[in-house]
Image (tube, rainbow, N blue to C red):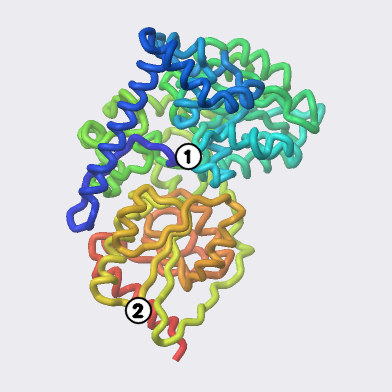
Amino acid sequence: MRSRTPSRHGPTVGLRGRAATIVREAVDAHCARVKLALIEGGIFGPVWGPTLRRLVSRRVADRLRALASHFDAAFYARQFGDGRRRRRIEHFPLLHYILVGSTENRPPRPGFDPIFYRQSNPDVGTDDPLWHYVSRWARRSVPFNEMARHAKTRPWQAGRQAVLTIHHGRGGGSSRFLDLFEEELWRKGRNILRLRAVNGSPTLAVLEDRAVSAADVVPAKVFDLAIDGPSLAEFARRRGVTRLLVNHLIDRPPAVMGWIEDLARGLGCSYDVILHDYYVLCPRVDMVNGQGRFCGVAPPDDCVRCVEKHGSEVPNVKPLTWRASFSEFLAHAETIFVPSRDMALRLAPYIANTIQVWSPENDLDLPPERRPYLAGKDPLRVAILGALNVPKGLRVLVSLARAARLAGAPLAFTVVGPTSDPALLASEGIKVTGAYKGDDLDGLIDVVGPHVVFLPAIWPETWSFVLTVALRRGFPVVAFDIGAPAERLRRLSRGQLLALDLMDRPADLLAAFLRLRDQLVVR
């Protein structure tokens, strides 16, 4: 879910190239702001705008024609709450989408989810996802949102009661969890409607209406939650909604909690909440502070300083009242669902409600751990699966790789997935495969051929789907003794758990990996 985040982390002394990376990121961010100002102030401005628009429109004329029938101008314009900015683009929304909106991952029409589409089609790169779809997949009806993907596997059944799930627009592991949770609800006899946030808009939401047709996804419905609460309630009532399921409130304004409670009252039903992380306690989501350290639910005064200096996932956040603002909403929920017992125990002191553990996967049917073949002089191939950023252990891995390089140790590291700082990893010889489709992970693992899998996360992850992949493949797993991965490995009596303080002792961490290598060498 951390595909786009304003949270920042300060430099770490001793990591080569980090200062240059921070400078480069700051320069890139400044250039992006200047570029946006020039485009919107020039091409869409009142002075040079008419002339510049004619010139630019000629350059992209083919794309304008191809996308016109796939673009909803009114829907696109509604995503801009800033009145001045909206007025500049509302007469030329498709051109604005091509030049700006596509790079901001703004949906070009209801139902088209650019983040989902990019994650499903990594070859999109920096191109416009709608153009990629129209030019390659439109005739094949390739899914472009979560509901389109599941329309055939969970068709609408007449006479069933329905559950309305309220979801963010970021994708990631929390979306995977919701997919599995909805699948179980469907098997138990419930129809599913998903209300999905629109990226870039604090209030707009899209609902794919599958109540009319069991075979196809019909045109999506659009609701502005700030003003369309009654019409959403009527829509849901007509489709038999008797339960609300809140998957995440990230990127929504604080008022959304009141809107959800009003919707529940209007429908005469309760609501449940799924918590995937520590967003209700920490506006940075993972309780990893600006120094790249797990804070362990720091006092609110510490949160104020952290957010002021290093940002958060929430604009204009008030850290002193952040936790209190969620407490009443969570107290009114019927049930709070979490993926692991570790998370339930960490949240229990702060939530006055029932917390129920719902594990998204079954650990009991996994094959046993296998011992990889490693000849005497072979380097130990270590794979890190999934997206890698600071909370996921990026700096730990860099420190470990640097220690191995300086010592000439026989270790080789590959990140099977994307990373927030590829230049820093490359500076220490760490390979990175880049983004992938979920179905491609096993193939990438086969290419890398790791001996072991390392999960270097420094925050208490709440499940870890990539751990499941490693366990299913039988790899020995090394992880820090924190969070759900440690809970799962301990329950299964497999893998190696390391003390979290080794994150600050790269020489000792290296020694642990060398001892593991010695255990695996075939003599």
- Label 1 to label 2, Cα distance in Å? 43 Å
User: Where on the picture, by quarter, is residue 202?
Assistant: top left
- Tag count: 2
User: Where on the picture, by quarter, is residue 484?
Assistant: bottom left
| Amino acid type indicated by mark 1 | Thr
Q: Is mark 1 in CB contact (under 8 Å) with mark 2? A: no
Mark 2, other Cα within 10 Å: few <14 / some 14–19 / many ≥20 = few
Q: Which residue is mark 2?
A: 515
Q: SS class of the residue under badge 2?
A: helix
Residue 439 as seen in the image, left or right of residue 304: right
Residue in the picture at 39% in, 85% down: 377
Q: Is residue 256 visible?
A: no
For residue 151, above or below residue 228: below
Check the image and name the residue furthest to the left. Answer: 13
Residue in the picture at 36% in, 33% down: 313
Residue 333 as seen in the image, left or right of residue 295: right
Mark 1 and mark 2 lie on one chain; the one further toward the N terminus is 1
For residue 193, above or below residue 152: above
Q: Which mark is residue 126?
A: 1
Residue 324 in percent (x, y) is at 35, 27
Residue 82 in percent (x, y) is at 40, 13
Q: Is residue 63 visible?
A: yes
Q: SS class of the residue under badge 1?
A: loop
| Amino acid type indicated by mark 2 | Arg
User: Where on the picture, by quarter, is residue 298?
Assistant: top left
Residue in the picture at 37% in, 16% down: 42
Residue in the picture at 46% in, 16% down: 53
In this orientation, which residue lies closer to the viewer: 212 or 81? 81
In this orientation, which residue lies closer to the viewer: 73 or 317? 73
Residue 421 in percent (x, y) is at 34, 50
Residue 72 in percent (x, y) is at 60, 18
In this orientation, which residue lies closer to the viewer: 503 or 282? 503
